[in-house]
């Protein structure tokens, strides 16, 4: 039997925060109706208390242009070292307001925006999750490896693995 743990509300938000922040970078996919899909790596700036995932972006980027045309996006997080994975489908919204940018500003973003949060090119993107699924482990990497090996030998399902839907 699979270990399914669907989480809602605060527990779901906490799991999104944990997995998104542990991975740090996701593949941010736009143009979901066209092939090939358009994807690029993006660093997560913040996950707020409502489960919204925030990014910083150049206001003139292809990504921003694509979001203006179709708000639907897909985010894929992978923290291979900890065997944690997160898939987020949601709607993106672009904010040019300085107060919103300032809320999610991170010092590392200065590598792209030399004038900091005051840079005229910076925008914030909020992704509001609509359909979220995760795969995780209950223990650290070493315990996970031992558990997988034991499952392979015994033929029984890995009890260390857990997955489920997250509803915020």
Image (cartoon, rainbow, N blue to C red):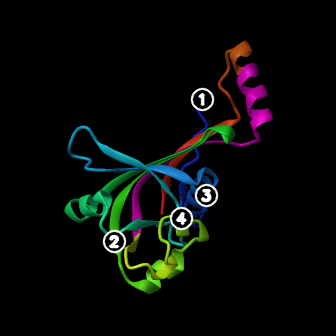
Q: Nearer the viewer, mark 4 or mark 2?
A: 4
Where residue 130 sits, quadrant-wise, is bottom left
What is the quadrant of the N terminus in the image?
top right
Q: Give the spatial CA distance, label 2 vs label 3.
A: 21 Å
Bounds of the magenta span?
A: 125-150
Q: Position of residue 2 (x, y in %)?
A: 58, 32
SS state under label 2:
strand
The circle on residue 1 is 1
Horizontal side, residue 158 vs residue 99: left or right:
right
Is 3 placed above or below 46 here? above
Dot 1: element = loop
Residue 21's mark? Answer: 3
Q: Nearer the viewer, residue 143 or 81?
A: 81
Residue 10 visible from this viewpoint: yes
Residue 126 shows up from this direction: no
Q: Residue 143: say if magenta.
A: yes
Q: Which residue is mark 2?
A: 94
Q: Earlier in the sequence, mark 1 or mark 2?
A: 1
Q: Position of residue 15 (x, y in %)?
A: 60, 57
Q: Is residue 38 left or right of residue 138?
A: left
Q: Between residue 105 and residue 53, name the one nearer to us.
A: 105
Residue assigned mark 4? 111
């Amino acid at each position: 039997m699979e270990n399914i743990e669907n989480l809602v509300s605060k527990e779901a938000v906490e799991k999104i925060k944990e997995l998104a922040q542990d991975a740090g970078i996701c593949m941010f996919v736009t143009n979901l109706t066209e092939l090939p899909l358009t994807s690029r790596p993006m660093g997560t700036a913040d996950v707020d208390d409502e489960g919204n995932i925030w990014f910083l972006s150049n206001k003139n980027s292809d990504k921003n242009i694509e979001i203006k045309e179709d708000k639907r996006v897909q985010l894929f997080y992978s923290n291979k070292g900890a065997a944690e994975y997160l898939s987020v489908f949601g709607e993106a919204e672009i904010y040019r307001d300085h107060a919103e940018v300032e809320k999610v500003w991170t010092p590392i973003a200065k590598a792209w925006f030399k004038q900091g949060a005051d840079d005229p090119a910076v925008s914030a993107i909020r992704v509001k999750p609509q359909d979220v699924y995760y795969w995780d482990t209950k223990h650290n990497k070493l315990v996970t490896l031992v558990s997988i090996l034991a499952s392979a030998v015994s033929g029984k399902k890995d009890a260390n693995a857990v997955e489920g839907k997250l509803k915020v």
